Amino acid sequence: MSTLLEIEQLEVEFGRTAAVRGASLTVERGETHCLVGESGCGKSVTALSVMNLLARGARRRARRLAFEGLDLPGLSESGMAHLRGNAMAMIFQEPMTSLNPAYTVGSQMTEVLRRHKRASRRTALDRAADLLARVGITAPGLRLGQFPHQLSGGLRQRVMIAMALMCEPRLLIADEPTTALDVTVQAQILRLLASLQRDLGLGMLLITHDLGIVARVAHRVSVMYAGEVVESAATAELFANPRHPYTQGLLRCVPVPGRIKRDEPLGSIPGTVPRIGPGFEGCAFRERCGFGDETCHQAIPRHAAGPTHEFLCRLPA
Amino acid sequence: MSVSSVTSGPRRGWRSLSTWIGAVIVGVAAICAIFAPLLVPHDPFAQDLGKRLLVPFWMEGSDPSHVLGTDQLGRDYLSRLIYGCRISMLIGVTVSVVSGLIGITLGVLGGFLGGRVDDAVLFAITTRLSIPVVLVALAVVGLLGSSMTLLVLTLGLLLWDRFAVVARSTTMQVRNLDFVAAAWCAGCSRFRILIGEVLPNIASHLVVVATLEIALAILLEAALSFLGLGVPPPLPSWGLMIAEAKDYMFFSPWVIVIPGVALFVLVMGINLLGDGLRDLLGARSAP
Amino acid sequence: MLQFLVRRLIVAALVAATVMTLAFVLTRLSGDLAISIAGPNATQADVEAVRKVYGLDRPLLVQFFDWVGRAVTGDLGESYFFKTRVASLIAERMPITLTLGLTGLVIALAVSLPLGILAAVRENTAFDRAVQVVALLGQAMPSFWLGLLLMIILGLQLGWLPISGTGSWEHYVMPGIVLAFSAIPALTRLTRAGMIQAMGSDYIRTARAKGLSRASILLKHALRNAAIPVVAIAAVQLGFMLGGSIVIEQVFALHGVGFLAWESIAKNDFPVVQAVVLVLAVIYVVLTMLADLMNAVLDPRLRGP
């Protein structure tokens, strides 16, 4: 089975706010699927929903949410805990605060292996040192004994990645792993993730707001807006042939050296992301679209623009 | 600035209920305190040795003219209880005023002026915190004799620390805010900034501290009176009533239960009111 | 780290010096000590004799520095009443007060930590509110009254525990409970707040993402961070308990340092009163330093890079 993750029509609500109103995507083994969108569009919530790490009071529903064919919502909390850190792992945006300040790097890394594989302390430490070296950290033995506050942001993120790989997961979910890092470090981390994926055959769901990252590492992309996936395609196809007005707008916003002319104004999408309450019908982008009409207030059909290219819009042109 | 915490539905309901309970308790206590002479059925000092240790109304053999019974000298318990309320409230409020004046002055000066002044204020607070309060209060009253004035002064001089701490930290927070800088730029003198900008903004936090300090002063006075070194007898402080009843407590337990419950309920009411005020005035961000 | 300790020691010494001065002033407040010592029936000659014997005829400043000089070497003077060295009197009674204080602290922690943790885990439920009510009750409870009530109920009516004296460990249970009551509200609130904050933090999300067990997340990861301020405050609370034990020792007839101070006040035994104030203040200062030290030990971030 090469489809690691299947999400079909995921919906997540917090109280009366619908954070995710219809997210569907799949992640295959060995591929990076990027989920891209602006802040507040629901991409992080989608990622957290997979492993059911949402805050208390969140309601999650999906037509299908499966990992290697296994239905996830049907699992108990302990069943889910068995998968986390083990078959599927997640890394987060803020390496500064994502590691426990009171315990050493080594202790936090080894506890995952000891928890899931009942490894001995020695075995776990050896593996941790191996992985630290693998993610490009020098003097891994020294680092294992250090505390998180003694490491820089880039180092901490590498530690997070190494920690995520301790139990050889098949799926890695990365929620904006480079956003909080310096630009130079960003590139290094991305290269690292790409090489790890190649070597380990990982499937990766990468959440980001940065189209540059998408262009660099993604095999497939899903664009999210106001809680819905509005377009998804193979990366090259999406950049060459964006069909949804939002995607088109996004791509216009990114200045490409060589293509953009002097004195040409930078693109922008007027307006702001709307807050969607319950019972909302139709296209969430209609106020900012520029192409819409009254039919955009009704349910929006999904079009296929190619074998792997889908988008949600009333306007087929 | 003061950021009021977002309390969710059921919590807010509970919070307002508890605040109301506190307000009612404090209200009743205030009425008792102010109108004591009008409310008492008997003279709280009048002894009647023929009617000693009568039981309260819920027990057999009680005397209807003494609803809560009498103490070991035949004095009406209810009357002494009401007068005791007056004493507790009086001490609580006056001590709070004295300690408030000292603590707020120190705290505001330290927080506003910073530097050496602040170091001195911090040192004073640290020193005050290391002094065993009950012991020193007992020693002062023991050495100088008990009187209301002395008691209030002593407690006032010993209980200013929380005022100082809160006044200092809130002043420091406010001092760093933009509108103070704006007033400074507009040429206001430091004194005017202090009075006009700082004080109004720290007032809500200090009101909360004041209510809690009143409760603390009442408890402390009760403890001192219990040990015989508080309010001078025959003034009916609740602590003193409990002490007097100690000898009889194994035979007539209600004699210590009644004033103790009164004390407990009053302090609880003040604390509830204080917590409620804290939410109302949005003063949750203060330490 | 070392610099920090040295600074704290200097402040501690200054505080001790200030308290020494205050304690000295305290006992000289009532005016002529010689008259109080000599008693109500003394003649003028008696009072003069007393004054000479106790060195009260020397200038105030001389008396002060004499006391200070002796106090730093451990000589806290001689008790007027017991005619023995104050230092040994205090040393004799200290174990009782310390046992009482530690018992109170242990009980307080044994109650506050679980309650605080559970209240945090069940935030905003009926249980949480119940815990907050308990904290309120503890705050409003007059300690001496609670002591008397416990005496009546547990000591007399149920006969479970002895009501006075210091014979066995059972004698410390009721007084310990009463002392604990004064510390439980603050410690419970602090534990609860700390746990709520810890549970909402990013590293707990990471711990969940690693599939760790609920117990491990709660007790190993969250509590470890939430406990840091609690431990520090616990040390300070112990200081308060030791200072406030005077009432409890009186109620339960425990002959500790508090009881000694109480007797000495009644008998105008000034050297003892002076010395006890100083000793309690020094203990408090030491405990606060200990609290800071523990903070540094428990929080790796404070140890420096």
Image: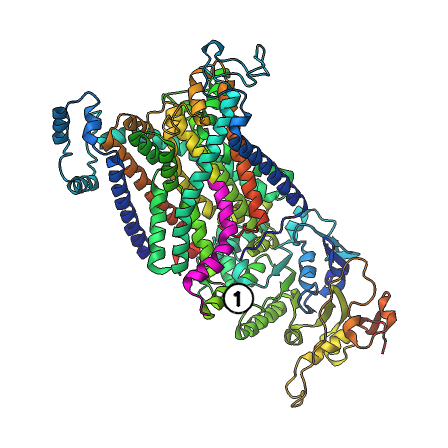
Q: Is the magenta stretch mostly helix, strand or loop?
A: helix
C235 to C146, vertically: above or below = below
User: Foreground residue, B209 or A250?
Assistant: B209
> How many numbered discs?
1
Measured from the top left, where is residue A257 in percent x and y? 63, 86
- Residue type of the residue flagged with mark 1: Arg
Q: Quarter of the image for the C terminus of chain A: give it.
A: bottom right
A302 to B126, vertically: above or below = below
User: Foreground residue, A40 or B268?
Assistant: B268
* Residue at screen point 65% across, 53% down: A55
User: Foreground residue, C69 or B213?
Assistant: B213
Measured from the top left, where is residue B248 in percent x and y? 45, 15
Q: Quarter of the image for the N terminus of chain A: give it.
A: bottom right
Task: Specify start and end residues of the magenta stretch as a single range.
Answer: B187-213
Tag 1, which chain?
A
Residue B189: within the magenta? yes
Measured from the top left, where is residue A54 in percent x and y? 66, 54
* Residue at screen point 17% across, 39% down: C63
**Which residue is label 1 attached to?**
A134
- SS type, badge 1: helix
Can residue B175 be seen in the rendering of this structure?
yes
Name of the residue lying farthest toward the bottom: A262
Residue B184: within the magenta? no
* Residue at screen point 72% across, 73% down: A271
